[in-house]
Image (cartoon, helix red, strand yellow):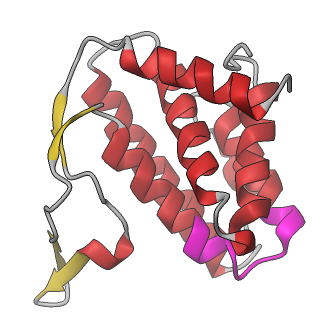
Amino acid sequence: MNSIDDLASHALEMLTNHDVVALVHGDAHLRNILLRNTREPVLVDFANAGPGHPLFDFVRLELGIWTVLLRQTDRKVAQTLVAKLLARETIDSEVTISFKRRGPAIEVALQSSVLIRESCRAVARGDASWFDQYRSMHGLLALLALRRPADHYLSFAVFSAVESAPHAVAV
């Protein structure tokens, strides 16, 4: 990786040059999702809602899920999972099989990522660059997470995956 500054600069350029704007929640994480009747999710706290990148809330939620669940697992396993998830546009059976029986936290993180990835693909509506935007968004949010030392391992796993992936953001 050339530098974190280069990664951030390129990611910001890619995301700000995106011509589609959506209404985003702006603070999608697990504490802002409540359950009604124990099954129906309800999004709360719209203080940060406004125009933004259509993938922002999905990536923010995914990173929040990873942060909570992967903190409970072996760091090497968590870093490998993040690297594999950010390496390819499609989460295939090879990835799911390689992490089977690694514990419930890994399985839930993987299942969540599959669903979030499907949602991102649907929101992108055929935009060929959606996965590069998705990875760029992960890179920017991982930079913000650096302020919490306990989450550094996850941020560095994201930086490494974004830089080394086949569709890697050029830095």
The main secondary structure of the magenta stretch is: helix
Q: Nearer the viewer, residue 106 or 6?
A: 6
Is the residue 61 above or below the residue 129 in the image?
below
Name the residue located 55 percent from the left edge and 21 percent from the top edge: 132
For residue 40, say whether it is visible.
yes
For residue 91, say whether it is visible.
no
Name the residue located 42 percent from the left edge and 22 percent from the top edge: 15
Coordinates of residue 29 in the picture (x, y in percent)? 37, 66
Is the residue 101 above or below the residue 1 in the image?
below
Q: Quadrant of residue 170?
A: top right
Coordinates of residue 108 in the picture (x, y in percent)? 54, 70
Is the residue 17 above or below the residue 160 in the image?
above
Q: Nearer the viewer, residue 48 or 28?
A: 48
| 64 relative to 92 in the view: left or right | left
Q: Is residue 43 magenta?
A: no
Name the residue located 76 percent from the left edge and 44 percent from the top edge: 83
Segment colored magenta: 67-78
In the picture, which quadrant includes the C terminus?
Answer: top right
